[in-house]
Image: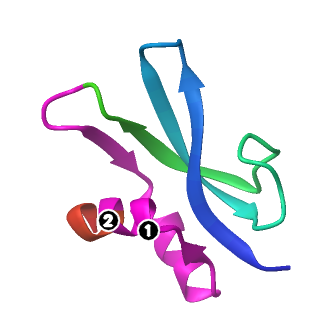
Amino acid sequence: MAVKIRLTRLGKVSKPVYRVIAIDENKKRNGRAIEVLGTYDPKFDPAKVVLNNERVKYWLSVGAKPTETVANLLAKNL
């Protein structure tokens, strides 16, 4: 099972909020996550990112691949 760290969308039509999740790469965007790793709110200036750094590092150490967007968030916050 290949695991990805990616975003899942929450919130209303004009007010998106995202969760950073670990999920099987074959699941849908809003499918059931293995673990919720944090949140990302792009409406704030600067964008508000809350991550559980310990769990993110764990998932990266066992081979989870972040998407491009999540990799950018991690580069700014780890």
In terms of secondary structure, where does tag 1 sit?
helix
Quadrant location of the N terminus in the rendered image: bottom right
Q: Is 72 included in the stretch rendered in magenta? A: yes
Q: In front: 18, or 13? A: 13
Q: Is 66 included in the stretch rendered in magenta? A: yes
Which residue corresponds to the image point at 28% horizontal and 25% vertical from the top-left?
Answer: 43
From the image, tell me which residue sits under label 2. Answer: 72
Disc 2, disc 1: CB below 8 Å?
yes
Pinpoint residue 9: horizontal percent, then vertical percent.
Answer: 58, 34
Give the residue type that dot 1 points to: Glu
From the image, tell me which residue sits under label 1. Answer: 68
Q: Quadrant of residue 46?
A: top left
Quadrant location of the C terminus in the rendered image: bottom left
Q: Is residue 25 above or below residue 42?
A: below
Q: Quadrant of residue 41?
A: top left
Pinpoint residue 48: horizontal percent, then vertical percent.
Answer: 26, 37
Q: Is residue 1 above or below residue 15?
A: below
Give the residue type that dot 2 points to: Asn
In terms of secondary structure, where does tag 2 sit?
helix
Pinpoint residue 35: horizontal percent, then vertical percent.
Answer: 69, 54
The magenta segment: 44-73
Q: Quadrant of residue 15?
A: top left
Neighbour class for label 1 at 10 Å: few (<14), some, many (≥20)?
few
Which residue corresponds to the image point at 32% horizontal and 59% vertical from the top-left?
Answer: 73
* Left or right: residue 51 compared with residue 62: left
Pinpoint residue 63: horizontal percent, then vertical percent.
Answer: 63, 87
Q: Is residue 9 above or below residue 49?
A: above
* Colour logic: rainbow
Q: Is residue 77 above or below residue 12?
A: below
Which residue corresponds to the image point at 72% horizontal and 73% vertical from the top-left?
Answer: 3
* Left or right: residue 55 compared with residue 28: left
